Image (spheres, rainbow, N blue to C red):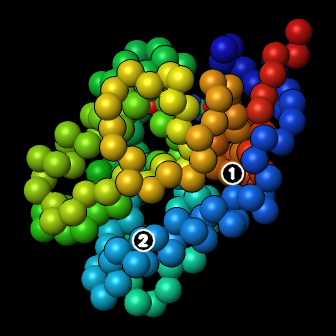
Amino acid sequence: MNDTADNYRLDRVTISKDAIRVRVSELASEIEREFRGREVIMTGVLKGAVIFMSDLAREIGPSVDVRMDFIAVSSYGNSSTSSGVVKIIKDMDVYAEDKNIILVEDIMDTGLTLSYLTEMFTARRPKNFKICVLLEKPERKKADVVIDYKGFTIPDEFVVGYGLDYAGKWRHLPDIWRVTDKG
Ligand code: 5GP
């Protein structure tokens, strides 16, 4: 892919906002069942997970003591291919040790980013470490990562919307769209 969004256009909606709403509420129920009566630090990976995590957190009832935190990462090297080596641009505000952490990410593509983050978080000795991902592209998988809460499985297509961007564009769209080459 090119560095500019100018060569790409929205093709079609692949997951509608209604389907997202239903699935997010199901995921929230799963988290609620598992963490009732306990504190959970939902840790979103900026910026892609912001919209997903905001909706997910609001679907979790008061029976769970939900806290919110964020990390920001950037991968070394080429931006369109994940190297798996991740630089932490912004870390959590609280210590993860002995805490219930749910890492919230927009999409798992090769899995290299999440594999790196899993190692990093595990070394911090949290009480529980769970991964919640909105989208997974299994065809591209290179690293074995256990996803505890997954929204949707999608084919190997580039998607935007609901927090996911292309060159900074289209994050705000309420549905998930496939993008395509203008040519
Ligand atoms: P991984 O390390 O799993 O290959 O990389 C995951 C990251 O690649 C995601 O956090 C996201 O930034 C980016 N990515 C992978 N596939 C897509 C896609 O279809 N759409 C968008 N917007 N980003 C993607």
- Left or right: residue 75 versus residue 107 is left
Rendering quarter of residue 142: top left
Q: Kindly state the secondary structure of the residue where label 1 is placed.
A: loop
Residue receiving disc 2: 31
Which corner quadrant holds the N terminus?
top right
User: Number of callouts in the render?
Assistant: 2
Residue depicted at 77% across the width and 32% down the height: 178
Residue receiving disc 1: 162
Vertical position of residue 49 compared to residue 32: above or below: above
Q: Is residue 96 visible?
A: yes
Amino acid tagged 2: Ile
* Mark 2 burial class by Cα count in 10 Å: few <14, some 14-19, many 20+: many
Q: Position of residue 52 (x, y in %)?
A: 58, 58
Task: Nearest to the eye among marks 1 and 2: give it.
Answer: 2
* Mark 1 burial class by Cα count in 10 Å: few <14, some 14-19, many 20+: many
Residue depicted at 63% across the width and 62% down the height: 23
Q: Position of residue 114 (x, y in %)?
A: 35, 38
Q: Position of residue 41 (x, y in %)?
A: 33, 69
- Left or right: residue 94 versus residue 104 is left
Amino acid tagged 1: Tyr
Residue farthest top in this picture: 183
Q: Position of residue 158 (x, y in %)?
A: 67, 27
Rendering quarter of residue 19: bottom right
Vertical position of residue 67 compared to residue 133: above or below: below
Rendering quarter of residue 119: top left
- Left or right: residue 19 versus residue 153 is right
Residue depicted at 46% across the width and 70% down the height: 30
Vertical position of residue 113 compared to residue 7: above or below: below
Viewer-nearest residue: 82 or 134: 134
Q: Kindly state the secondary structure of the residue where label 2 is placed.
A: helix
The earlier-in-sequence mark between 1 and 2 is: 2
